[in-house]
Image (cartoon, rainbow, N blue to C red):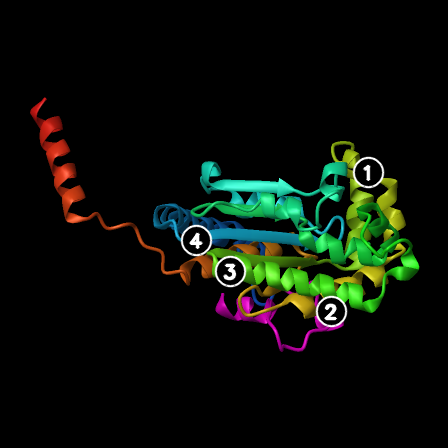
Amino acid sequence: MKGIINKFKITGGKKFLLKDMDTSWSGDLKKEETDEILEGLIKETAVLQSELYADNRYSLLVIFQAMDAAGKDSAIAHTLSGLNPQGCDVVSFKQPSTEELDHDFLWRHYKALPQRGRIGVHNRSHYENVLITKVHPELLLNEHLPGIGNVKKIKKKFWQQRYESIRTFEQHLAENGTIMIKFFLNVSKEEQKKRFLARIDDTDKNWKFSASDVYEREFWGDYMKAYEKAIQETATKQSPWYVIPADKKWFTRIAISSIILDTMMKLKLEYPVLAKEEKEKVEDAKRILLAE
């Protein structure tokens, strides 16, 4: 799986253009192999989750960004299945509330960070503030920012400052033990259309469909430019991006699980070693129990 991981990993300095990324790539893997491979990856990750908690030096933050119908929800459900839910925090970020808009754009995301020893998953994230707001800059007016009284006031310098804020935020987290994995599920416009139509035709799923989803397709090109720029500006060695082909959900899940496992393995997690006095107390407790 190492080749797969490196294929999709974007770090600072690496040339990256979305048009060069194949949204349906799956290498030599076959769909019929999926269940067995995924089960093995999740079992290994579950062991490391226990070590992550016991080690208590790191937390893991997994970010999912994507266009609608790219498969974020199902990817989260499948890749986290088998893990201890008591050690996971999943947060889905919707339209910001009035209270959230009265704080800086990172505030609500900082509040949702996982504690050391835990795995946090953010379904959408602080990147919405350089994605949807880049495509629809009028949304920024809701933040009542100094000097931004109208859309014409939003210049290139503003976006560069936002990218810098994000890089600084993520560097701070990395230096304090939060390991971040950033996934962009790269679905094609054609595949998104198929999934929208499937949702409409399936009475059990059409509740997930909104007419606004079709409206947003009109801005597909703008979104791709926004994603490409955000990834180029914020992909670093400490906080890389992974651009995952999302046209084949079964492959998307394998790739995500492989990357999460690989990242956790590199942490060299350890169970705590008891001090001599603590070991003696444990042995005393054992003797008491055996004597009952």
Question: Which residue corresponds to the image point at 59% horizontal and 43% vertical from the top-left?
Answer: 111
For badge 1, the amino acid type reads Asp
Tell me which numbered mark, 4 or 3, is placed earlier along the sequence.
4
Residue 23 percent location from the top left of the image? 71, 63
Q: Secondary structure at mark 2?
A: helix
Tell me which numbered mark, 4 or 2, is placed earlier along the sequence.
2
Q: Secondary structure at mark 4?
A: loop
Judged left or right of residue 240, residue 58 is: left
For badge 4, the amino acid type reads Tyr
Q: Are marks 4 and 2 in contact (CB under 8 Å)?
A: no
Give the CA separation, mark 3 to mark 2. Answer: 26 Å
Give the CA separation, mark 4 to mark 3. Answer: 9 Å
Which residue is under mark 2?
18
Mark toward the viewer: 4 or 1: 4
Give the CA separation, mark 4 to mark 1. Answer: 44 Å
Which residue is under mark 1?
201
Which residue is under mark 4?
58
Tell me which numbered mark, 1 or 2, is placed earlier along the sequence.
2
Return the residue nearer the eye: 1 or 29: 1
Judged left or right of residue 148, residue 59 is: left
- How many other residues sit within 10 Å of disc 2, few (<14), some (14-19) or many (≥20)? some
Is 205 included in the stretch rendered in magenta?
A: no
